[in-house]
Amino acid sequence: MDHNIRIAIIGGGPAGLSAGMYLEQKGYENYSILERSDHVGGKCSSPHYGERRYEMGAIMGVPTYYAVHDVEEFCGITHDGPNLIREYRNKQGRTIEPFNPKKNPLKLPHLLAMKKAVKTLGELLETKYKGYDVNGHRGVSQGRYDGFEVTSERKPVSGTNENLKDLCLPFSQFCALNHIEPVMDIWIGPFTSFGYGYFDEIPAAYVLKYLDFRTTMDFVKLNLWTWKDGTQSIWEHLNDKLKHSARLNSSITRVERRDGKVYLTVNGQEEEYDKLIVTSPLDQFVQYADARDDETEHFNKIIHEEYDVMAIKTKPQHQPVMSYYIFENMVKERLGHLMVLYRRWRDDDTQPLTTYALRNHQDMREVPYDVCKKTVLADLETMATPATEVIREEDWYYFPHVSSQDYSNGWYEEVEAMQDKYNTFYAGEVMSFGDMDETAEYSKELVDRFF
């Protein structure tokens, strides 16, 4: 492809900014990143409070975040944030130790079964489900894998494995099929509480591509990365380092693709490009673009989570010693309840705490935002962490994905076949997963495949 082509990238989050970085590294410098808000980072959102920053979106990373590490090296930065520790509480607010057999002698059989199931899953993923952890989803519903292996070298790999079709099942069914149901007690912590839905509705492919075995063990062992100035600072540094920083406050009201070109109406002015990379939500793209029938058909099938985050203040005497997780609230029957409270700065009682709650499930009525907020505030009272003030709220459009049925019917293979069909490439969360590393990794693969 001609290195002088004009490329428009819609979205200044991790996917869009990393696409710009990988294009630069391959010699494509005639690009524009268009971001509709007044800042970069997307759901990596780290507002300032005094001289520090707290998190309203992504919190942490792990050593398998190779694309994020690419950004760190490109920018000359590193993960230099506070160490994270956590405890567990029941819904009555009492501290518990659910994985300690000495504290739970009656649960010893279950804990032993869990340990055995985790070992079995690790073995299955290495053998029966070889190729499961390749970034992206193309080929899974057809029993094949094609992409980069999950190593720092990211060598291209491909192959056939009929067993991969099992990943189309909801994760709970996948676990039942393989008689490893107890592993859900481990995987639920960094999945459901982080806003990615419930195991009876989300295809196993999403769960296991995000939480591959090594990544999950890093979460369990608290082998985590954080950034002093928050996850948003990663992308701010990248934006500053790129030859063409994102153009903020860019309102795109129309996309037209005709005569081999792409025309974007940006803040009322038409701009001409040769190629378009869409990293913003594809189900919203059809609302302002000249969407073709196949785009409309596929992108209207995208569903997402409603994930609510609040930053709250509490009195110093009510500050918890550390972050806490409430497993009993990570089930659909407790929709809208507090799942996690995050204390980022344990050396400063004046800094905000953040709360996290899901309020939708495919089989249940969505919990209204105001009801969820009241429920979480009541849960904080129960946890002896009463809020004196809510200083920020986010109702995130979170984790766009497709249903198990649409996944099994080949949604990803069909959308991947549409890449560059209209001088348009599709990237971002739905094409990989909703965390910052998977989206950046997909941008790398997209650039390697097509540019």
Image (cartoon, rainbow, N blue to C red):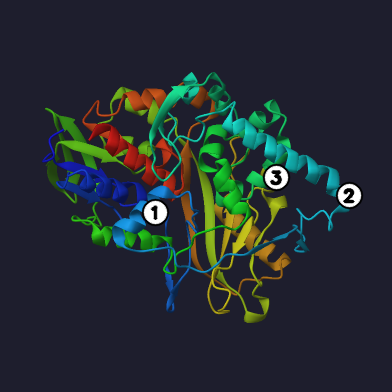
Q: Give the amino acid type for the residue marked by disc 1 in the picture.
A: His
How packed is label 2: few (under 14 Cα within 10 Å), some, or many (20 or more)?
few
Question: Closest to the observer: 436 or 441?
Answer: 441
What residue is disc 3 on?
185
90 left or right of 365 in image = right
Task: Say which of marks 1 and 3 sits in front.
Answer: 1
Residue tagged by mark 1? Answer: 69
Cβ–Cβ under 8 Å for marks 2 and 1:
no
Q: Nearer the viewer, mark 2 or mark 1?
A: 1
**Disc 1 on helix, strand or loop?**
helix
Q: On the image, which quarter does residue 155 sit in?
A: top left
Q: Marks 1 and 3, how far apart in space? A: 29 Å
Q: Is residue 200 left or right of residue 390?
A: right
| Structural crowding at the residue carrying mark 3, measured as other residues with C-alpha within 10 Å and reported as few (<14), some (14–19) or many (≥20) | few
What is the spatial separation of the Cα atoms under label 3 and label 2, in whole angstroms? 17 Å
Q: Nearer the viewer, residue 359 or 383?
A: 383
Amino acid under disc 3: Asp
The answer to whether mark 3 and mark 2 are in CB contact below 8 A is: no
